[in-house]
Every structure is written in structure tokens, then in C-alpha cells.
Image (cartoon, rainbow, N blue to C red):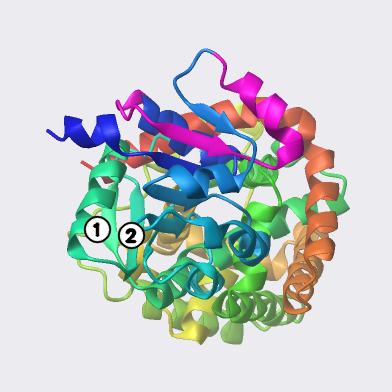
């Protein structure tokens, strides 16, 4: 269809982390003959060794990529995008197309505008998933910031090998949607992990953390902690909209907990009901649930507890607070399903499942108000939610990293199994929602 371009166009990726390698390998397998990649100069030999036996060419640094390539993607951390583009951007080939793969587009686009020559086109992208997820059917954002229609057409040809669902947005729209779909989602799962670590708990060993939607919580939390901390820190700290939302989530968690410990049932029920009506009240009767049946989710458990001893009531404070947060922010999460990540889809799925199953919701509310044995877990969740919000509001990358890595170390022996189970779960839920 466009074999000439595949033979002649030079593709370049600056940054050989997970996503950089994923892009290079996918494009090479799709038949693009001139795929080039680089990382830090001190990693040149190791990266070169990693790509031995492939058609992908490894260069010492970004100057080599910038001077020769017709399409260039900066696959670097959002924290460093300005410095990296400043260093290599001025050497960009005349007429080339340049973009980035960061999760926060405002600083990325500002860096590209500032340091690239005026005869260079700017078209950014963002695959809304990690390198371990099948890109087929997943959202892929394309941002035509400064480019001709002809150059956009070429970019779409290059990215077509991912078989993803392309969505065209501005940088501002992208940052708004990624905050809405990812920021609080990540914060909730990060808080769960921190709370389990603080209580020295492996949740799959506890009856109120096993079975059904609890399996989603556990597997996704471990999936996040098995990744690199900077994947989540950049989005949370460098996106001001995300900062506001994470702050509100911590506030919603604390407000609900205060009502719980005072057993103010009428106020608690009213607040949960109002939030639920705001988010889910407009769904049509023929709405197809995002999540699979709760019984099917039992298959994705890390627990060795016999089934007859599983599933004691849980307050689901994390989910109740999420819907309260959306209500307080006047944010409708269904508006952004076109740009959903696999993690957001699962988070939305378990939240929707809880609020649309009245018996389960009643059990959660009753447990939240009157089950004293799980109150220490909820109290720790409140503390950790506030801790994450403070790290983000202070803009502390180092504080974020330390908090993340301490929890990751606690769970590291479980990552291999949880990744396998999590991949199966994502595949089944994705298949269900694309029918």
C-alpha cells in the first residue's frame, strides 16, 4: 500500500526505555526498513547488544537520530523532555516530523516549539497503554500541532502498524483527558498499595480483599507498582489538572471516613447516593456494562483462601471516594471512554459494577459504617491518600519516587504472577468491551 515509504523513510526514536523499544520493534516488524533508536551515550553498547540480530539500528545519541531521520519521536520522561529537546532539537533534519510520547503534552509541545527549527513539523502522539499491552484497539492520541496535511497523512501511515484507535486532539485537550482518565485512577491504586504495605498486608491473604472486583484492585495495584515510578509521577506532578484531582480524591476519602467513624448513616448514604446519581444516573437501560460478571472475575485471584471462606464485606472506600470525587469535580468519566487506558477501563468497570448492584452497594455502606474490624485498613487508606496528594502538590519527584519504590519493594516477589494474571484479565475485559 505504501511500500515506497517503508523502504525510504527514516524513522528515529530518542529514548530506548519500554515505550521507545516497543515502538521500534513494532514498526520494524511491520516492514519499516529504516528504524533507528538511541539512548544515553553511556548505554550505547548495552542497547546495541539488545538489538543484535534485528534490522533496528542503534546510534550513540540523539544527534545522529535528529540529523538523518524524517520522523522522530522523543520517548523520554516528561521531567526531562525540555532538556533533551534543547540538546538535540536544533540538529533536526529540514522538513522532518517531530513529536513525543510523554503523558503530559503542555511541557512537551512548549519544548518542541522552543528548540526545533521553524522548518520542522510538530506532530505528537501518545499510546494510552504501557509497552506490555497489545496496542490493537487501544486509544492512540495524535496531536497535529504545527504541520501540513501531507505530513499528518505520513504520520498516520507510520502509526497504522499498531492497529490502535486514533483520536485527534490538541495538547490542551489531551492533558485534560489524561488527567480525567488516569490521574485519580493511578492515585487510588497507589494508595491501596501504600496502605497494604503500611499494614504489612498481602491483600490476597485476607478475606475482605479477595474475590470478584477485589481481584481487579489487587492485580492492577501490583501491575502499577511493577512498572517504573516516573511513568506515573510525570502525569501527576507536571499536569496541573491532575494535581487538583488527586487533591480532591484525598479530600473525598477523608470526608467519607469522618462520616463513617461517627456512624452518621443518613449523611453518609445521602452523599454516596448523590454522587452515584451524578455519575451513573444518566446511563440508559441498555447500557453495556464495562466489566465482566463478578463471578467471572473470581478466576483472576492470587488468593489461596478456599472460596467458601472468601468475600467478607468490604467498605470499598476507594470506590465510594472515587465517585464522590467525580461528583465534586463535576466530572463525567463516561465522556472520555474514547481515550480510556486499560487501567481506567477496569477502574471504571469495578466502580460501575458496585454502584449498579444495589445489594453490593448496601453491603459496602453497612461495612463502612459498622464493621470495626476493617476500620484500621480504611484509616490507613485515608492516611496514604493524603500522603500521595501531598507529594504531588509539593511537586516532589524525589518524594514520589521514594514512596513508590518502598511499596514496590514490599510486593516485588508477587509481580511475576500478578503480571500474568493481570494480562489475562485485561485481555478478557478488553474483548468484552469491544464486542
Q: Which residue is found at the position 20% from the left and 41% from the top?
A: 435
Q: Provide residue 261's location: percent of width, then percent of height.
A: 77, 76
Q: Which residue is mark 1?
A: 152
> Is 356 rendered above or below residue 277?
above
Taking the image as shown, residue 423 lies to the left or right of residue 4, namely right
Given this view, does label 2 or label 1 mark the residue nearer the observer? 1
Q: Which residue is found at the position 68% from the left and 81% from the top?
A: 251
Front residue of this view, candidates 286 and 368: 286
Please say whether residue 35 is one of the residues in the magenta stretch. yes
Point out the residue furthest to the top here. 53
Q: Provide residue 65's location: percent of width, then percent of height.
A: 51, 44
* Quarter holding residue 136: top left
Q: Provide residue 38's location: percent of width, then percent of height.
A: 59, 38
Label for residue 253?
A: none
Whether residues under marks 2 and 1 lie with C-beta atoms below 8 angstroms apart, the answer is yes
Check disc 2: other Cα within 10 Å, few if <14, some if 14-19, many if 20+. Answer: many
Please say whether residue 206 is one of the residues in the magenta stretch. no
Taking the image as shown, residue 286 lies to the left or right of residue 249, namely left
Q: Which residue is found at the position 31% from the left and 39% from the top?
A: 9
Query: Would residue 317 be seen by someone viewing this image from the given angle?
Result: no
Element type at mark 1: helix
In space, the residues marked 2 and 1 are separated at their CA atoms by 9 Å
Label for residue 142?
A: 2
> Is 357 rendered above or below residue 82?
above
Segment tinted magenta in the rendering: 29-52
* Quarter holding residue 266: bottom right
Amino acid at each position: 500500500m505504501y511500500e515506497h515509504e517503508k523502504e525510504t523513510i527514516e524513522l528515529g526514536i530518542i529514548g530506548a526505555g519500554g515505550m521507545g523499544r516497543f515502538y521500534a520493534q513494532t514498526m520494524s516488524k511491520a516492514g519499516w526498513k529504516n528504524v533507528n533508536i538511541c539512548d544515553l551515550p553511556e548505554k550505547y553498547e548495552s542497547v546495541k547488544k539488545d538489538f543484535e540480530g534485528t534490522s533496528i539500528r542503534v546510534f550513540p545519541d540523539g544527534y545522529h537520530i535528529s540529523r538523518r531521520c524524517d520522523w522522530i519521536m522523543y520517548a523520554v520522561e516528561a521531567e526531562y523532555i525540555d532538556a533533551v529537546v534543547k540538546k538535540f532539537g536544533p540538529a533536526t533534519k529540514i522538513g522532518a516530523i517531530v513529536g513525543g510520547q510523554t503523558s503530559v503534552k503542555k511541557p512537551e509541545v512548549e519544548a518542541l516549539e522552543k528548540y526545533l527549527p521553524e522548518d520542522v513539523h510538530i506532530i505528537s502522539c501518545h499510546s494510552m497503554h504501557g509497552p506490555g499491552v497489545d496496542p490493537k484497539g487501544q486509544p492512540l492520541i495524535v496531536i497535529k500541532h504545527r504541520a501540513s496535511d501531507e505530513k499528518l497523512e505520513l504520520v498516520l501511515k507510520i502509526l497504522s502498524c499498531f492497529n490502535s484507535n486514533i483520536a485527534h486532539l490538541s495538547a490542551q485537550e489531551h492533558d485534560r483527558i489524561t488527567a480525567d482518565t488516569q490521574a485519580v485512577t493511578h492515585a487510588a491504586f497507589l494508595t491501596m498499595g501504600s496502605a497494604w504495605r503500611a499494614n504489612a498486608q498481602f491483600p490476597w491473604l485476607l478475606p475482605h480483599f479477595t474475590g470478584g472486583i477485589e481481584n481487579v484492585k489487587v492485580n492492577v495495584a501490583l501491575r502499577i507498582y511493577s512498572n517504573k515510578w516516573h511513568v506515573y509521577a510525570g502525569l501527576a506532578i507536571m499536569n496541573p489538572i491532575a494535581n487538583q484531582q488527586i487533591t480532591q480524591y484525598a479530600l473525598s476519602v477523608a470526608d467519607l471516613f469522618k462520616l463513617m467513624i461517627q456512624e452518621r448513616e443518613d449523611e453518609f448514604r445521602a452523599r454516596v447516593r448523590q454522587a452515584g446519581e451524578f455519575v451513573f444516573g444518566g446511563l440508559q437501560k441498555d447500557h453495556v456494562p464495562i466489566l465482566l460478571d463478578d463471578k467471572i472475575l473470581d478466576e483472576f485471584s492470587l488468593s489461596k483462601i478456599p472460596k467458601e471462606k472468601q468475600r467478607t464485606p468490604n467498605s470499598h472506600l476507594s470506590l465510594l471516594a472515587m465517585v464522590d470525587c467525580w461528583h465534586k469535580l463535576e466530572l463525567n468519566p463516561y465522556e472520555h471512554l474514547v481515550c480510556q487506558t486499560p487501567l481506567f477501563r477496569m477502574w471504571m468497570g469495578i466502580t460501575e459494577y458496585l454502584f449498579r448492584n444495589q445489594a453490593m452497594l448496601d453491603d459496602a455502606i453497612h461495612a463502612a459504617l459498622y464493621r470495626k474490624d476493617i476500620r484500621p485498613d480504611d484509616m490507613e487508606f485515608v492516611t496514604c491518600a493524603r500522603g500521595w496528594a501531598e507529594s504531588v502538590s509539593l511537586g516532589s519527584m524525589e518524594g514520589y519516587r521514594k514512596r513508590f519504590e518502598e511499596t514496590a519493594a514490599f510486593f516485588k516477589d508477587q509481580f511475576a504472577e500478578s503480571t500474568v494474571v493481570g494480562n489475562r484479565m485485561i485481555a478478557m475485559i478488553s474483548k468484552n468491551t469491544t464486542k
